[in-house]
Image (cartoon, rainbow, N blue to C red):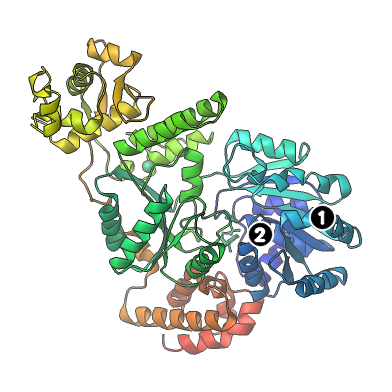
Amino acid sequence: MSKALNILKEVFGYPAFRGQQAEVIAHLGDGGDCLVLMPTGGGKSLCYQIPALLRDGVAIVVSPLIALMQNQVAALNEIGVRAAVLNSSLSQQDAAQVEQKLLAGEYDLLYVAPERLLTARFLNLVTRIPVALFAIDEAHCVSQWGHDFRPEYSQLSVLHERFPKVPRIALTATADMVTRKEIVERLGLDVAKVFVSSFDRPNIRYQIIDKTNSRSQLLVFIQAEHPGDAGIVYCLSRKKVEETAAWLVDHGMRAVAYHAGMSMQERSQNQEKFLREEGIIMVATIAFGMGIDKPDVRFVAHLDLPKSIEGYYQETGRAGRDGQAANAWMVYGLGDVIQQRRMIEESQAQLKFKQVATQKLEAMLSLCETTTCRRIRLLSYFGETTDTVSCRNCDVCLNPPQVWDATVEVQKALSCVYRTGQNFGAGHLIDVLRGNLTERVKQWHHDRISTFGIGKDLPERTWRAVFRQIVALGLLTTDSEGHGALQLVEASRAVLKGQESVYLRLQAKPERSPGKRQTDDLVPLDSTERYLWEQLRSWRAKTAKEHGVPAYVIFHDATLHELVRLCPKTEDELRLVTGIGARKLDKYGNHLIEILRGC
Ligand code: ADP
Ligand code: ZN
């Protein structure tokens, strides 16, 4: 293991292993199979990259996304590791050259797309060379239940059949048990050792707030907490993606869009821009994000409710991979609940799928409505328990919501649904409760029913929150025709009869963000430090451009920060900075010392 630690320090420039990295590397290094479950940003790549350097032969890495392999390989080349890509993006000539070098033993790592790997030609090629290991990245792509399903992944068991002696490592950030089981079964990893890390991402602050006007809320959030930062904004529909991106641009932000309806070229252009330039906001559907290993995404915002906690966690997990403070921010309202329920209802899927989808949605809703720590909820959903009751880094812990006895108000709401014939959505019901004489109210003579005006004492906002929560709690349902009409259910009866009380969350004040922006600790304070920071950043930008790689491939923000803080003046001192290995010291040491002379 001292060899592995040496590589970590010398090649990657990191002082110590994180979490279970050392155990995984030792196991794989000794030729054992394993399945590694680690959250995004946990440091999965090193788990196979270091054994690739320790063991004889080339490590073959299967990765589902062609567009992103290139960036990983660029980062490896940057630190002097011999790595290459083999996929359909290469010309025939380039591919032939890669194959040639592969046969000549000139690579430590080769990244391959699964469809390429499975060709008879490639498998034959592999029989002719020593292979250090097979790494199967994003292994949850074997799962038919997940939205990242890739049919080629289910054929990867062929690796074990053809090359039984070569150790395999499967990696994923998807935590739920069903997927875990599926990976083991489909990849034939029955005897593999499973390494499960904590899925906690302590640097991510979770916030779920009431939706009033999602776009302006988003703008306020970005302006207040993330000016100039890179972030991802998730929307449900393609149309909303485009509108939101355009709107942000109109408001002076550098935003780009991404969804499956765009041309391949446009998509990859925008993705590259997001990866390579600094401070770009990516507005996207969930089609975007798998395999994105940009470390400095400072926020992930959801303007629509995700379908499940798995999805939410995977998407929010793309924030703060570098371990620095980041925000997972979401707005959520009654419309979301109704829309998601309707989508399940209207889908053509089999009953079994609908049931699973409903359960997942219920869990997501209870996360939204919880009055206890969101992080603890999330972790317990993935089977992880903790002794603490507060994480001190989610909106609930920072700004605990009040709970109020809303039994009477809920009775009023339910009774209004009943009196109006269970034919109307929340907007109209609120008009009736608040005694608004709208055209619709007059048309249906709802000013003559007993619930007209009995809810004048509460503002519309509060009523919307009441309706949202009682739908989320399952005390009302939406009609099966999909008109958004709210209808009573069995559970409504007990409340109406006064046999059960209902406690609801009191909404937090709108737009108030809990606490101060945390990323401040990254930005140096006094003027000399700030000057150095800017110098380093512009040197990094220039260098990245010359090398044709994203800025973070040169150095992470954390490395620049440490440089400013420690102000190393010699090569030996530079060597101690996180993220500076032998190769980078060699290449950039002099430039850095030059810039840091001023401190
Ligand atoms: P994952 O694939 O699990 O999402 P990565 O392998 O991309 O995560 O690692 C996330 C970030 O953490 C990367 O920028 C990586 O360089 C960094 N990292 C990984 N291991 C260590 C370590 N032992 N010390 C410091 N940084 C690390
Ligand atoms: Zn918390």
For residue 46, which numbered disc appears in the image? 2
Please tell me the numbered disc located at residue 30: none
Q: Which is nearer the eye, 136 or 34?
A: 136
Q: Amino acid at mark 1?
A: Thr
Query: Quadrant of residue 74 in the image?
Result: bottom right
Relative vertical location of residue 196 with respect to residue 327 in this rendering, above or below = above
Q: Residue at x 50, y 61 (%)?
A: 322
Q: Is residue 437 visible?
A: yes
Residue 362's spot in the image, x, y percent? 43, 30
Q: Secondary structure at mark 2?
A: helix
- Residue at mark 1: 119
Q: Nearer the viewer, residue 521 or 442?
A: 442
User: Which residue is situated farthest in the front direction here?
Assistant: 443
Above or below 523: residue 22: above
Q: How many marks?
A: 2
- Does mark 2 have its CB less than 8 Å from ligand 1? yes
